[in-house]
Each structure stands twice: as structure tokens, then as C-alpha cells.
Image: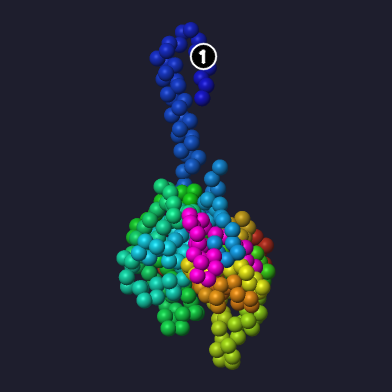
């Protein structure tokens, strides 16, 4: 920063004082520009100046995607809802529900092998699976809320995602995205340095998906709380290690968590698209449990986006 030369009457001591004041003002302005509010707007990345068939994401592109680690190794993905809550798939904790000490949550990572000094690693206090989830069947209501041991600090790399109102529908052929650090093929883990992968996937009509996974009368596989997305020809899909991660759709400029990566037959198999737990189907349950979760959506017939949020406690 240049300071104009003072007139003769202004001594050197005054010049040093003026320079110091200017530097302080400049520093304060910079700090204010990067300060993240306690409850930032959900679903809006603040960009810094493998999934099968996927591509590398950009650093801080999906700041709500977290790695749920078991014994220090990536196990599942999840999505940050508030500074104390993460949502993921219930099946990620099968057999370990009462052992939260085995798990931790890594936030703000882009490369798992080199998460960087601005990432945060937080323990899990407890896990609340949906009361309708069956550990035996393991399909319907495959959603769990994870309570972090302590509040995290938001940053450009760590931000919450929005939940859709129960009125929000994602029609067939809507282009959405998934992201995760899972295998790039069956039995082939994501290579080092394990960069977060992303993949665009279109929503598939539920009737078509039901036919693809038809098991016979009375054995409905695709339930009313599931979404299907992906490609009928296969080749691109979520895979092992992506479970619990987000299916994200952008509505009116904000990213909404449309679904949670739940299950599928194989990885990227023909006529076996990915199956996701629908968030609109469970939004009321999440809202009852999580203080501070933010909703976005379009009210039917309003023609305008609406939003609601509960104040974080």
C-alpha cells in the first residue's frame, strides 16, 4: 500500500502512525470480508479465488460433504446440516450403533490423504437412526442423524446444505449431483490422494425404477421414501464408500439435499440405477430433531421460492 508523501509540517512519527492506521484498517477490512457468520446461508458454496465414471471436484465446491471415518479410515459420507448435526445413511452404523467412539467426522476435506490445516476432525456423540429403519431389512428409511461431540466452526470449506420442504418434488430427468470418496469400480478404491469425486445424475421416474428392481407381487423393493437417479446404460454410478453421501439438486440458486446415497445392485450395472433415501419424505422427522436446520423450496402454485429456518440453539 502506498502512502502519499506528507507535507513538510507532518513529521516522520506522524507518517508511521498514519501508515499503521491504514494497515490496521486494511487488515480489518480483509478479515470482515472472509468472516463466516455463525449461521451462514445453506446450500451456497463460497468458492475460493471417484464415484464410478465421475470427475475430480474443485476445492470447496461441496463444503457440506463430510467423511465419516471408522477407526481413522473413510467409511461413509454425510452432509452437514448445522454446526452440530450431520445426516447420513443408517446402514453405515449397522452393528456399531452403540460404539460412537469408533467413529469421527472429517469436515472441510477435499483430498482425504491431505485434508489440510483448515479441515476439522470431530468425534461423534451419538447416532439417531430413523425409527422406521429396520437393521434386518435395511432398505426403507435408511437415514440417520449424527450428533457431533462439539460445535464446528464454519468456513469457506465447511458450510451447511439446505433441506427441501416436504412440498418440493424432483421430477424425472432433473439433473442433480452426487459426491463422495468411494470406490471408482467394484473392488477398486479411489487412488491417492483421494480427491472428492462428483457425478451428474438425472432423476429417474419412480415407476420405471420400480419395474427395474421388481421382485414380484408383495415384494416391493422401491418404496415411497426412495428416489432413483443415474443412467440405465450403467457405467456411471455411486459405489462402495459413497453410502450416506448427498444427492444434491440446485433450486433457485441454493443446493438442496434431495436424497442420501443408500443402495443399488453392484456399481454402475446396466438397468441398476442408484437408489437414494428421499429427504422430502423425512424432512418433518429431521426438523423435529435438529435445531437450526434450514429449508428451502417452492410452495405449490406460488411461483416464488420460499424458505424457513429454525434458529440454532
Image check: 123 left or right of 217? left
Residue 269 position, x and y percent, is: 60, 75
Depth check: 6 or 217 in front?
217
On the question of residue 88 being in view, the answer is yes
Q: Residue at x 55, y 81 (%)?
A: 223
Q: Nearer the viewer, residue 299 or 81?
A: 81
Q: Looking at the picture, how far across and down is residue 205, in whole percent?
A: 65, 75
Residue 206 inside the magenta-drawn segment: no
Q: Secondary structure at mark 1?
A: loop
Number of labels in the image equals 1
Label 1 crowd bin: few (<14), some (14–19), many (20+), radius 10 Å: few
Outermost residue to the top? 8
Residue at which label 1 appears: 5
Please name the residue shown 47% across and 64% down the image: 77
**Residue 293 appears in the rendering:** no
Q: Residue at x 32, y 70 (%)?
A: 99
In depth, the one of 71 and 155 nearer the eye is 71
| Residue ranking furthest to the bottom | 217
Q: How is the image coloured?
A: rainbow
Q: Is residue 186 magenta?
A: yes
Classify residue 199 by image quadrant: bottom right
Q: Quadrant of the C terminus?
A: bottom left
Above/below status of 103 relative to 142: above
Q: Residue at x 40, y 62 (%)?
A: 73
* Image location (x, y in percent) of residue 265: 55, 78
Looking at the magenta stretch, what is its main secondary structure? Answer: loop
Q: Determine the image quadrant of residue 152.
A: bottom left
**What is the magenta range?**
180-203
Amino acid at each position: 500500500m502506498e502512502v502519499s508523501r506528507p507535507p513538510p509540517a507532518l513529521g516522520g512519527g506522524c507518517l508511521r502512525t498514519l501508515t499503521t492506521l491504514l494497515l490496521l484498517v486494511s487488515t480489518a477490512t480483509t478479515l470482515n470480508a472472509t468472516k463466516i457468520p455463525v449461521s451462514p446461508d445453506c446450500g451456497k458454496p463460497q468458492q475460493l479465488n471417484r464415484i464410478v465414471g465421475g470427475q475430480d471436484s474443485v476445492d470447496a465446491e461441496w463444503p457440506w460433504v463430510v467423511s465419516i471415518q471408522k477407526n481413522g479410515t473413510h467409511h461413509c459420507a454425510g452432509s452437514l446440516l448445522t454446526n452440530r448435526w450431520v445426516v447420513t445413511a443408517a446402514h453405515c452404523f449397522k452393528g456399531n450403533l452403540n460404539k460412537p467412539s469408533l467413529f469421527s467426522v472429517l469436515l472441510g476435506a477435499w483430498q482425504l490423504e491431505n485434508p489440510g490445516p483448515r479441515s476439522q476432525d470431530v468425534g461423534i456423540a451419538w447416532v439417531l437412526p430413523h425409527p422406521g429403519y429396520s437393521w434386518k431389512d435395511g432398505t426403507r428409511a435408511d437415514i440417520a442423524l449424527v450428533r457431533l461431540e462439539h460445535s464446528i466452526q464454519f468456513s469457506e470449506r465447511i458450510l451447511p446444505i439446505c433441506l427441501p420442504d416436504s412440498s418440493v418434488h424432483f421430477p424425472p430427468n432433473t439433473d442433480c449431483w452426487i459426491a463422495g470418496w468411494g470406490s471408482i469400480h467394484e473392488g477398486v478404491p479411489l487412488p491417492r490422494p483421494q480427491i472428492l469425486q462428483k457425478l451428474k445424475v438425472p432423476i429417474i421416474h419412480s415407476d420405471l425404477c420400480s419395474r427395474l428392481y421388481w421382485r414380484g407381487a408383495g415384494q416391493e423393493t422401491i418404496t415411497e421414501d426412495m428416489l432413483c437417479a443415474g443412467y440405465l446404460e450403467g457405467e456411471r454410478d455411486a459405489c462402495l464408500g459413497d453410502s450416506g453421501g448427498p444427492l444434491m439438486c440446485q433450486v433457485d440458486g441454493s443446493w438442496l439435499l434431495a436424497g442420501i446415497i443408500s443402495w443399488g445392485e453392484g456399481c454402475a450395472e446396466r438397468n441398476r440405477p442408484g437408489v437414494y433415501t428421499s429427504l422430502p419424505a423425512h424432512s418433518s422427522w429431521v426438523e423435529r430433531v435438529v435445531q437450526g436446520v434450514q429449508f428451502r423450496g417452492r410452495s405449490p402454485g406460488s411461483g416464488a421460492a420460499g424458505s424457513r429456518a429454525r434458529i440454532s440453539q
